[in-house]
């Protein structure tokens, strides 16, 4: 079954994403939202520009074989926000110029950033 998403679905996605963004203290990111058809079949995606500290959360405008329930939209929103949260750990892995020691320091720093953000919601 194919489901074409409407503004009401996008609003639910954004509302839940913003809620989690605020809970996790991700206010240091400039985050925008979009709805468009995603060719790979993902329900949503998180596009990250680490240098500019910008992210774009995209909801697929077409769900295939997945009903766009409030719960599924919330889960998709939370999933993409958590991808952004984990970027603090992942980002140092992509910096080729870092020495092993500096990469370990950056990973440790990122890990603690994530832990401190998670402590806000526990």
Image (spheres, rainbow, N blue to C red):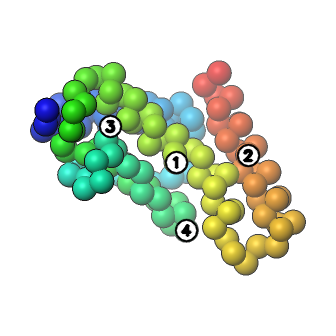
51 w.r.t. 48: above or below: below
Q: Nearer the viewer, residue 94 or 57?
A: 94
90 w.r.t. 76: above or below: below
Q: Tag on residue 75? A: none
Q: Residue 101: percent from the left, percent from the top?
A: 87, 66
- The earlier-in-sequence mark between 4 and 1 is 4
Mark 1: few, some, or many residues within 10 Å (few <14, many ≥20)? Answer: many
Q: Which residue is mark 3?
A: 14
Does the image show residue 70?
A: yes
The quarter of the picture where the C terminus appears is top right
Q: Which residue is mark 4?
A: 51
Secondary structure state at the residue bearing disc 2: helix
Q: Which residue is mark 2?
A: 111
Which picture quadrant has residue 12? top left
Q: Residue 25: percent from the left, percent from the top?
A: 57, 38
Residue at left 60%, top 46%? Answer: 86
- The earlier-in-sequence mark between 3 and 2 is 3
Total marks placed = 4
Residue at left 71%, top 51%? Answer: 110
Q: Which residue is mark 1?
A: 84
Q: Residue 39: percent from the left, percent from the top?
A: 25, 56
Left or right of residue 49, residue 103 in this image: right
Secondary structure state at the residue bearing disc 1: helix
Q: CA distance from mark 4 to mark 3?
A: 24 Å
- The earlier-in-sequence mark between 4 and 2 is 4
Q: CA distance from mark 4 to mark 1?
A: 13 Å
Q: CA distance from mark 4 to mark 2?
A: 19 Å
């Amino acid at each position: 079954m194919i489901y074409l998403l409407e503004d009401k679905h996008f609003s639910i996605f954004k509302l839940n994403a913003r809620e989690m963004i605020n809970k996790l203290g991700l206010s240091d990111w400039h985050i925008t939202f979009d709805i468009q058809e995603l060719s790979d079949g993902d329900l949503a995606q998180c596009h990250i520009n680490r240098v500019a500290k910008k992210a774009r959360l995209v909801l697929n405008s077409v769900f295939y074989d997945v009903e766009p329930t409030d719960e599924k939209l919330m889960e998709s929103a939370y999933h993409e926000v958590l991808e952004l949260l984990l970027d603090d750990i992942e980002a140092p892995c992509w910096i080729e110029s870092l020495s092993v020691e500096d990469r370990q320091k950056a990973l440790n720093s990122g890990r603690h950033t994530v832990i401190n953000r998670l402590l806000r919601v526990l």
